[in-house]
């Protein structure tokens, strides 16, 4: 990983020197183990803050929305997919963004690592050849990195950036396809079972909107939850209001969600937020043979109309 | 323990449409329970939270003087959920009221002083309450010269036409009405409020300037007042912020460490300069 | 120190007996999280924990609370406030930082103007805290006037000395709780043990923030352009405020079905874009910079003005849970290091 870090820094340094961009968005070391944090670089003397590791979990594309300046973004597979959608939705111009693409081996789920360590405080984490060396006050453990990836990384089939201006690092092997087995299993359950699961999850939601704000495709100036005329949902944590929030947000993202997982990573209550998004992604794939974030040329299916569009879901819901 | 969140019940007695675009109305409310009236003691400058049950609450300055018994008046501009619901009300309907809230005008400090009231557009409600309070027989002698400078964008948008007519006839008050732009019938002054202040040039000796109005008007009025010699300590403003609880607990309406609902809404310009920079 | 001894093996039976008299809230595991839940038996509690995900302030200041119900006809309305009968409540196993936050919430809700919902609940609550022998690296309670064994806000403080707890009696409420339960008084030798534990824990807490002169420096730095840089990565969610033990902003909403309905108080966050948005469209805090600055200034300056107390207890939840790792300690230290700030 440190080789990647050096390459990124070299590149960014040259971009700034050549005045190719005014701003570079990347990651720098966070203030705790297993945290890397978004970093905004504008001057050459700031370049050495940039780094790359298995904890660069935020989706940086969210910081591209409505920017005026030329910006470079250090983007992994899912960040690039989100950028593709944002460009298609005209939230930023393609010419404005210099994509420094990073083929991604998945990001490590720090909460899963913490759970594995049984809540003992982790003081230091080092990465070494596919292994995570975890150190605390009175312990040292080595974990296999690949066993601790985020759920969204485990189903990701575009770890390599689908578009880029520069590629840093070697291409990684992609998973063959997303089988959506998890969605099929959920679909196979009865309505009661599914509602029991969902209402339990939504019951934990505290309406902090971290999921919405972390999502790069949620960029509405006035979100429907904040609209007062008309008021669509209540502001309390009543489970029916919370359910509507998540369901409607998922629908607003249908065909646009790139399944980066930023939403569920941001959630402090560990709500299974992506469940609905996964189901809608599968539906979009089945109905329109479309996957979000793959190509700048493909039009988002719910943003356009074709006479031969599948109408099954209207006629036979 | 008094519950600061429980509203009193008020009946809508009268609705007066103030402006020709019908966007501003003045409501006269009476207390449903007579004993509530006796317990409701306020001074001009204070406000109350009016509830439209089912839609919510919003803060409004008391537009009538406490010397006017039997009812409370509130001037409401139709702009959002609660104000629209209030505007759709007819006489007889019930609303909720929580108050009096806020600090009100510093009557003790104003005693014996000349008072220059400057208002623009919609922002005149509490100054109207103060003017009627000061003009009341029981109070008039305690205050000095009273001048009122008030302007609206055009004649159809002037509020409180009845009051201005009455005040215009009084010898113990100087009234200067103006509009930004007149119409065929308007024979009064034409000019922006700051401009009129310059022309009228009220004396700052032993005087307070009380300013209430939209941010743009205040921005241009303050330098004129300063020039006339009114010190920041004797320039009073009534501020507005989004409010909810009205009692300094919900954390929403603060500017620096002052809550507009609890420590205001009346602040001297000196206090405001002290509080914060240009930003909130 | 007035104290009793309770053996760890006796805690379960104590809790079970307390459950008969009080609604007992203790840290409990739910869906992989540790939260303060109402327990119906000691077995449901999980006292071997670091801290709860959300602060237990919700037990005194719930996220959603009905202020009153109303019922209308065309020309009359009836308002009904909740009965106000609160069952005695016991919060068991709260951390000293969270207990200390109650002293600040007391100043907000029980000051010149009183919030009867909070006040009656608070009067009916006994607070039994467990001190922190193992502070985390994200804890900074000592920087802001607290400590891993602070008694502020507690009625009883449990100090772990191995097989037993030395229970410091902080208030009359606490004393009454232990009365006639047969617990031994702690002698001087036992109390001396606690001093060692406390000293060790206090020493292990990291540097945190330099609070000396912090308020004055922040006041001077209000307009500094550095705020823009410091807040650039903030995504404007409400995680920090909702998990925070001292945050108390709320919204008041009406929920109606026809002519009847409820007026409800619900948590709100100064970090949300529409928090200060006025109906006219004017928003005094239009961007993340103003809103984040408001949070910092409120906690470290305005609350000091209003309540003589820093509005932060150093629990570290905002640090560990922020989705983008915007660290409050880093923000404050950056502000303090600015040149020209004396």
Image: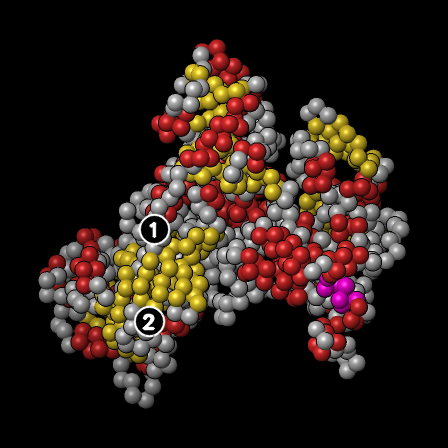
Mark found first going from the N terminus, 2 or 1: 2
- Residue B229 position, x and y percent, is 27, 58
Horizontal side of C322 relative to A169 (left or right) equals left
Please tell me the numbered disc located at residue C169.
none
Q: Is residue A73 above or below residue A287?
A: above
Query: Residue, x 43% and y 20% (percent of image)?
Result: C182
Residue C268 appears in the figure: yes
The residue located at (65%, 59%) in the rendering is A192
Q: Is residue A198 visible?
A: no
Q: A21 or C111, which is in the foreground?
A: C111
* Main SS category, magenta section: helix
Q: Which residues are magenta?
A: A276-285
Are circles 2 and 1 on residues that touch, CB within 8 Å? no
On screen, residue A262 versus residue C185, left or right, reads right
Q: Secondary structure at mark 2?
A: loop
Given residues B153 and C190, the one toward you in this image is: C190
Q: Which of the 4 image quarters holds residue A52?
A: top right
Is the same chain shared between marks 2 and 1?
yes
Question: Mark 1 sits on what residue?
Answer: C83
Residue C73 - label? 2
């Amino acid at each position: 990983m440190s080789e990647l870090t050096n390459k990124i820094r070299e590149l960014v340094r040259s971009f700034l020197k050549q005045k190719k961009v005014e701003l570079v968005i990347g990651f720098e070391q966070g203030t705790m183990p297993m945290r890397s944090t978004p970093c905004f670089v504008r001057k050459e003397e700031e370049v050495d803050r940039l780094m790359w590791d298995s904890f660069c979990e935020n989706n940086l594309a969210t910081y591209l929305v409505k920017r005026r300046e030329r910006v470079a973004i250090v983007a992994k597979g899912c960040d690039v997919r989100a950028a593709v959608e944002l460009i298609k939705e005209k939230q930023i111009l393609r010419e404005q963004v210099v994509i420094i693409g990073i083929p991604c081996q998945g990001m490590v789920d720090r909460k899963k690592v913490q759970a594995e360590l049984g809540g003992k405080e982790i003081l230091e984490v080092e990465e070494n050849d596919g292994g995570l060396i975890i150190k605390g006050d009175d312990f040292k453990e080595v974990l296999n990195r690949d066993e601790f990836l985020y759920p969204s990384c485990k189903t990701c089939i575009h770890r390599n950036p689908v578009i880029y201006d520069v590629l840093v690092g070697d291409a990684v092997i992609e998973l063959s396809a997303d089988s959506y087995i998890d969605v099929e299993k959920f679909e196979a359950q009865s309505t009661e079972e599914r509602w029991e699961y969902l209402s339990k999850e939504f019951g934990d939601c505290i309406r902090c909107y971290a999921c919405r704000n972390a999502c790069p495709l949620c960029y509405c100036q006035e979100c429907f939850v904040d609209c007062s005329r008309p008021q669509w949902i209540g502001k309390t944590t009543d489970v029916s209001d919370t359910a509507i929030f998540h369901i409607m947000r998922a629908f607003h993202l249908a065909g646009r969600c790139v399944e980066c997982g930023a939403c569920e990573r941001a959630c402090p209550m560990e709500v299974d937020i992506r469940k609905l998004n996964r189901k809608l992604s599968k539906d979009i794939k089945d109905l329109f043979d479309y996957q979000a974030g793959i190509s700048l040329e493909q039009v988002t299916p719910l943003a356009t109309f074709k006479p031969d569009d599948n109408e099954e879901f209207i006629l036979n819901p | 323990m008094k519950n600061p969140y429980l509203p009193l019940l008020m009946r809508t007695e009268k609705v007066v449409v103030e402006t020709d675009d019908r966007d501003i109305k003045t409501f006269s409310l009476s207390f449903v329970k007579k004993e509530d009236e006796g317990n409701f003691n306020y001074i001009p400058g204070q406000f109350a939270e009016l509830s439209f049950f089912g839609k919510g609450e919003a803060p409004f300055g008391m537009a009538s003087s406490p010397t006017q018994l039997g009812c409370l008046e509130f001037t409401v501009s139709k702009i959002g959920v609660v104000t629209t619901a209030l505007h759709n009300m007819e006489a007889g309907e019930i609303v909720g009221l929580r108050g009096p809230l806020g600090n009100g005008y510093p009557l003790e400090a104003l005693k014996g002083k000349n008072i220059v009231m400057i208002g623009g557009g919609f922002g005149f409600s509490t100054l109207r309450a103060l003017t009627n309070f000061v003009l009341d027989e029981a109070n008039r002698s305690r205050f000095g010269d009273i001048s009122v400078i008030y302007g609206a964008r055009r004649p159809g948008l002037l509020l409180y036409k009845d009051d201005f007519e009455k005040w215009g006839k009084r010898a113990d008050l100087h009234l200067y009405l103006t509009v930004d732009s007149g119409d065929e019938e308007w024979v009064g002054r034409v000019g922006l409020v700051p401009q009129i202040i310059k022309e009228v040039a009220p004396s700052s000796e032993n005087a307070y300037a009380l300013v209430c109005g939209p941010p743009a008007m205040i921005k241009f009025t303050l330098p004129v007042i300063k020039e006339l010699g009114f010190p920041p300590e004797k320039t009073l403003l009534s501020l507005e912020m989004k409010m909810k609880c009205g009692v300094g607990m919900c954390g929403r309406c603060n500017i620096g460490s002052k809550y507009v609902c609890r420590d205001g809404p009346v602040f001297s310009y000196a206090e405001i300069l002290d509080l914060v920079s240009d930003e909130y | 120190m007035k104290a009793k001894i309770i053996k760890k093996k006796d805690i379960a039976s104590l809790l079970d007996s307390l459950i008969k008299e009080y609604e007992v809230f203790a840290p409990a595991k739910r869906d992989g999280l540790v939260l303060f839940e109402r327990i119906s038996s000691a077995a449901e509690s999980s006292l071997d924990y670091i801290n709860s995900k959300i602060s237990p302030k919700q037990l005194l200041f719930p996220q959603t609370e009905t202020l009153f119900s109303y019922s209308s006809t065309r020309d009359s309305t009836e308002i009904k406030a909740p009965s106000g009968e609160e069952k005695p409540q016991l919060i068991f196993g709260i951390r000293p930082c969270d207990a200390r936050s109650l002293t600040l919430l007391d100043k907000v809700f029980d000051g010149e103007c009183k919030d009867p919902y909070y006040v009656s609940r608070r009067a009916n609550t006994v607070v039994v805290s467990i001190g922190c022998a193992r502070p985390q690296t994200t804890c900074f309670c000592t920087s802001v006037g607290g400590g891993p064994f602070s008694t502020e806000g507690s009625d009883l403080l449990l100090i772990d000395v191995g097989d037993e707890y030395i229970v410091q009696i902080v208030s009359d409420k606490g004393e009454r709780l232990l009365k006639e339960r047969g617990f031994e008084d702690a002698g001087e030798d036992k109390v001396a043990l606690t001093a060692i534990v406390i000293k060790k824990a206090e020493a292990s807490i990291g540097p945190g923030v330099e609070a000396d002169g912090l308020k004055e420096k922040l006041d001077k730095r209000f307009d500094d352009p550095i705020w823009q840089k410091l807040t650039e990565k903030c995504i404007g969610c409400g995680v920090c405020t909702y998990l925070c033990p001292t945050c108390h902003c709320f919204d008041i909403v009406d929920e109606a079905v026809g002519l009847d309905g409820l007026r409800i108080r619900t948590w709100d966050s100064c970090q949300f874009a529409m928090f200060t948005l006025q109906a006219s469209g004017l928003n005094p805090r239009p961007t993340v910079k103003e809103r984040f600055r408001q949070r910092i200034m409120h906690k470290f300056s305005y609350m000091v003005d209003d309540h003589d107390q820093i509005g932060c207890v150093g629990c570290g939840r905002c640090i560990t849970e922020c989705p983008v790792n915007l660290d409050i300690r880093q923000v404050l230290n950056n502000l303090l290091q600015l040149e020209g700030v004396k």
